Amino acid sequence: MSAPTAPAPADERRAVDAVRALDGPAVLPPARPARATVLFVVLGVLLLVLVVLSAGVGQLDIPPAQVVGSVLHHVGLDVGPAPENVNGDAVLWAIRFPRVTMAVLVGAALATGGALMQGVFGNPLAEPGVIGVSAGAAVAACATIVFGLSTLGPWTTATAAFVGGLVTTLLVYVLARSNGRTEVVTLVLTGIAVNAVCGAAIAFFTFLADQQAREQIVFWQLGSLNGTRWPYVGIVAPFVVVGIAVAVVLAPRLDLLSLGERAARHVGVDVERLRLVAIVAIALLTAAAVAFCGIIAFVGLVVPHLVRMVVGPGHRVLVPASALGGAVLLLAADLAARTAVAYADLPIGMLTALVGGPFFFWLLRRTRRTAGGWA
Amino acid sequence: MTDTSRILALDLYGSTSRIVYDLGLGDRVVGRDVSSAFDGIKDKPLVTQNGHDLNAEAILELAPTVIITDTSLGPWDVVLQMRDAGIPVVVVDSERNLDNVGTLVHEVADALGVPAQGDALAQRTAKEIKTKKAEIAQVVPKDVADRPRIVFLYVRGQAGIYYLFGQGSGADSLIDSIGGVDVATKIGWKGMKPVNDEGLVKAAPDVILMMTDGLESVGGVDGLLEKLPAVAQTPAGKHRRIVDMDDTEILSFGPETANVLDALTRAVYAPGDTK
């Protein structure tokens, strides 16, 4: 046997518990399919309500009935009242709907990315913003914008963000692993370092471009959905759809991975390939979220944990529920960002951090208690 | 593009709105940017937020039928959103200097379908500027070594950040036309960039031009000398030769340019006669 080690990490202990459980009468927790259904229904309804509400509220208020009417008219059905204000339709279709769609896509992408990350790293604190993946993607996106690169036309920024996010995720993955485990402290510290370096790089690029553009730095660091247009939505949508589809497909195998690496291998999961595919998916989702909206942190942390508190850790439910939950959360945050202060557009990352930061503290304390110290 | 019943003229310097008013179409203007504050427009709704950022919803709320802007106000996405919404947007030149006033007037007048008035305004402005330049030439010292070294400083509040306006910012043209030595261009300063203390002391200006609100935000000349000790080290600071002018006028280079030149020249060469 090797030299005595620190207390066994959580996943190994879980594997031991699982094996012990199979010896005697089954002591697995009862399945809760009803809860999952209720959660999906509630989230779905909330999403629809928020979409209609968010599209109607703003400087130019449009009642919900007219919002729905406008959509129906555009689809071809002459049902419902059209917006009364002469520019109501323009506001809805040129400003609000692109923004609402982007919020839904980015929120879903961030939350799913967070759920995937927590599964792959086996760590409850993993999240694209905290670990620095968003920052890596943002540096690449910022570079293409500042240096005016457009080799792939309108897809350049998003693709560069994907490459940046991929490189950063792989870097963090390699640095944070030792003896087949990902250590909490190393992960968080790597995140701090990556965030610091990438933040400085973004500030430097922005300074190179236009020494007056301090607002650009704020945009990248805290994110904003202001100025979203349909072409941007068109680029982000395929990234997000593919990313979430991959995540849903990987979900059952992530459940097996949570038993521990050895246990998963014994059951037939190709762990390395699973991790790599998940990392690519995470990079795809993060790139979509960051390329046009800047770094919006903590959505990927808060949403999967809230979902777990309701329906437990099973990934088959967690991944789609996180996508829905993320969309709802970001839509609500964007509504607040647009309307909290008259005439101003608050950076949305500021709001998510105000909520996510304290949540992160609470999570930290809880992880510390249950994992028996800094594992 | 045919309908010019509801006009929005937006730019960083306030020049386009001034031109629209001087073309006689002021009653059709429905809103303003933060750099336009002259009588007649200052009560109209503001469509910029956080300083100079365009607010898309505020613009749409005013239901304009034509928007005239240049590339100086952002975010550019908002301008594109206006086009998406079906409002014609005319983009004019964003350069501001003494030679450009005529071109700008013509561009705005053509966009609004009043080329004849545009010609008249451009000619009148050119003539005023020419006359004023001749007057100024009488006052300015013939020997270049005797001319005052002038810089344009942009100061805001207490963060200790101040910008020097150099080549291409409009300040260079302004300083040249009142007969000063444009120090910023001499040291190769392009555009509007933050300057550090040593750079300012090395530039050693005799006169500092500023915007009124900026000067107020640091607490007047006394406040300026206290908060920015680098200014106190310059000849301008030592002799307290700080000239300030209203933010919305000093760099606007619109039809009122001749008056701006007049006021500045008096302030620089004959300060006893001015406030």
Image: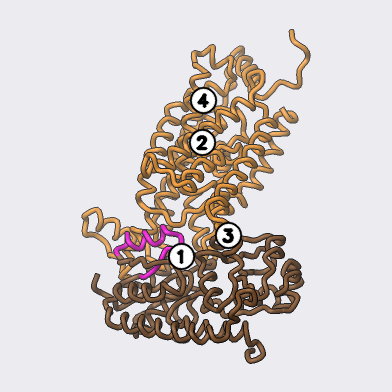
Chain colours: A orange, B brown
Q: Which of the pair A3/A373 is nearer the observer?
A: A3
Q: Write down the residue under mark 4.
A: A254
Give the residue at x 60% y 81%: B141
Q: Which of the pair A240/A199 is nearer the observer?
A: A199
Q: Percent position (x, y) of residue B124?
A: 37, 85
Give the residue at x 43% y 69%: B58
Earlier sequence position, callout 3 versus callout 1: 1
Is A335 positioned to the left or the right of A176 in the image?
A: left
From the viewer's perspective, is the residue at label 3 or at label 1 nearer? Answer: 3
Q: Percent position (x, y) of residue A1?
A: 74, 7
Q: Residue furthest front?
A: B143
Q: Label 1 to label 2, Cα distance in Å?
A: 31 Å
From the viewer's perspective, is the residue at label 4 or at label 1 nearer? Answer: 1
Q: Please say if the residues under marks 3 and 1 sit with CB atoms less than 8 Å apart.
A: no
Q: Write down the residue under mark 1.
A: B73
Amino acid type of the residue that numbered disc 2 sits on in the rendered structure: Gly
Is B82 positioned to the left or the right of A198 in the image?
A: left
Q: Write down the residue under mark 3.
A: B188
Amino acid type of the residue that numbered disc 3 sits on in the rendered structure: Gly
Amino acid type of the residue that numbered disc 1 sits on in the rendered structure: Leu
From the viewer's perspective, is the residue at label 2 or at label 4 nearer? Answer: 2
